[in-house]
Image (tube, rainbow, N blue to C red):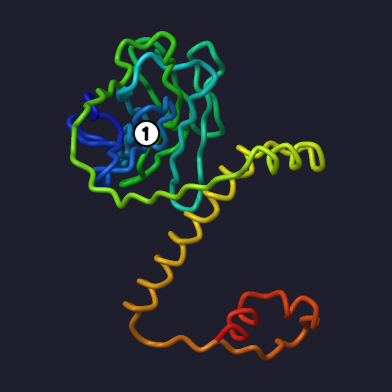
Amino acid sequence: MAQTTRGNVTAEDVLAAADAAPDTIPRGYASGYIVNETLDTTSYGTLSYAGTLTRLPVRPYTVTVDCTVGATALQATDDGSGYLRGYDIQGTIDYTTGAVVIEFTDDPGDGAIIYVSYHQDLEAATDIPKIISKLSTKGVFAHVYALKDTIGLESSYALRRRFGAIAEDEMASDLIAAINSELMNTVVYYANANYTGTVNWDNTKPTGVSYFDHEYADDYVFAKAA
């Protein structure tokens, strides 16, 4: 169970359970990579924009700023020293506080979203997401299968001398195979008894497929079995 709200996960969400589907499939919960976090939206006549990133501290050399102005995609990346450098777009970033300042060379107009992608420095972070494991007890009603086998000492000795096999191991394998066979036959029986509708398998060889490949294809095998 999640103990932190992060990414697409809310605190108290069940992330994994043996008897039920999870509340959500985690994305961006344990990962330190943040993709396209919105910094700001441009407005006509304004060249400078500022904002603060949410996952701190930020790992140097991992920051990318993207903004599409009209049909032009602008991008700036950090140089590891706190400067964001790009063509017609530049700025600064404070890796500790997450403060970002962006400067456009030309007016970006209205409505262009400024996105920032970056890695959180998890080694220095204090907000590592947390989960808690809970144990619940439920009754299990199982179908019991049991078989036994016997082998004489003389047969056991002969098996070892002639084939180098241990009788106990061979008996165990045979018993397991027999129980598995009964289980699979039971599954097939109930599947056949409860199926609805019909399925027709065509064993006609497709154009461009050799007879050898065709006879080993699932459709051919199923058609022959039917």
Q: Is residue 163 above or below residue 117?
A: below
Q: Is residue 42 above or below residue 56?
A: below
Q: Looking at the image, which is closer to me, 208 or 171?
A: 171
The residue located at (45%, 67%) in the rendering is 185
On the image, the x and y values in percent for residue 172 come to: 56, 42
On the image, the x and y values in percent for residue 7 come to: 30, 34
The residue located at (44%, 31%) in the rendering is 117
Q: Looking at the image, which is closer to me, 140 or 156?
A: 156
Q: Secondary structure at mark 1?
A: loop
Q: Which image quadrant for residue 131?
A: top left
On the image, the x and y values in percent for residue 31 come to: 41, 28
The residue located at (63%, 85%) in the rendering is 224
Residue type for callout 1: Gly
Q: Which image quadrant for residue 194?
A: bottom left
Q: Is residue 195 left or right of residue 223?
A: left
State the count of labels.
Answer: 1
**Label 1 Cα crowd, 10 Å radius (few <14 / some 14-19 / many 20+):** few
On the image, the x and y values in percent for residue 48 come to: 35, 28
Which quadrant holds the C terminus?
bottom right
The residue located at (33%, 36%) in the rendering is 38
Q: Looking at the image, which is closer to me, 221 or 104?
A: 221
| Residue at which label 1 appears | 28
Q: Is residue 74 above or below residue 52?
A: below
Q: Looking at the image, which is closer to me, 43 or 130?
A: 130
Q: Which image quadrant for residue 26?
A: top left
Which quadrant holds the N terminus?
top left
